[in-house]
Amino acid sequence: MIRSVLAAAALVLATATPASAEPTGYLIWDSDKDSSPTHGSSGSWTPPSLFSVREDPEKGNLIRIKGESPDERDYIMIELARHDGQRIGEGDFADERVHVVYHGLGSWDEGGDFAVEHIAFNAEGLISEFDGAAEHHNGDRPDSTFRAKVSYRR
């Protein structure tokens, strides 16, 4: 599902991230040349600036991931949602909804894939920990895949 190089980089970062009470995390992503809206762009933000992972029950229980590059020049948002509107828990989800927004342009993939390896909530019910990956396609077009790996601690 997720390109092995991307997964290996995420594994290195995950094992190198020290345990602390301070907010930590990473957002690693890449895309093929014909992917939309990212068109071959990539990023490895450890940690991203203005990083958040939120659940939105009013929008079909989607999970919204937002991050900005440390130099504040790049911004990306990834939304994960199930077609049935059920809450997203840990597991692998194939042929579901993945939305990617980059530089203000967005594109939905109604047949995207994502995995939630770990999710935890704080006392207020907000996501406090999230580890996952997503893949977004532009239909069946070759060289049109966006991939991301996320680790979030707050």
Image: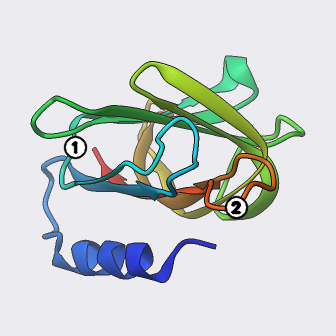
Amino acid type, callout 2 = Pro
Which quarter of the rendered picture does the N terminus lie within?
Answer: bottom right
Q: Nearer the viewer, mark 1 or mark 2?
A: 2
Amino acid type, callout 1 = Pro
Which quarter of the rendered picture does the C terminus lie within?
Answer: top left
Looking at the image, residue 54 lies above or below residue 133: above
Report the Cα–Cα distance between label 1 and label 2: 29 Å
Residue located at (25% from left, 80% from top)? 12
| Residue nearest the viewer, comparing 131 with 20 | 131
- At which x and y percent is residue 62? 66, 33
* Label 2 neighbour load within 10 Å: few <14, some 14-19, many 20+: few
- At which x and y percent is residue 16? 16, 77
Res 143 → quadrant? bottom right
| Residue nearest the viewer, comparing 146 with 89 | 146
Mark carried by residue 48: 1
* Label 1 neighbour load within 10 Å: few <14, some 14-19, many 20+: many
Count of marks placed on residues: 2
Res 134 → quadrant? bottom right
Residue most toward the right?
84
Residue located at (76% from left, 27% from top)? 60
Looking at the image, residue 2 lies above or below residue 56: below
Q: Which residue is mark 2?
A: 142
Looking at the image, residue 16 lies above or below residue 67: below
- At which x and y percent is residue 84? 90, 39
First-in-chain label (1 vs 2)? 1
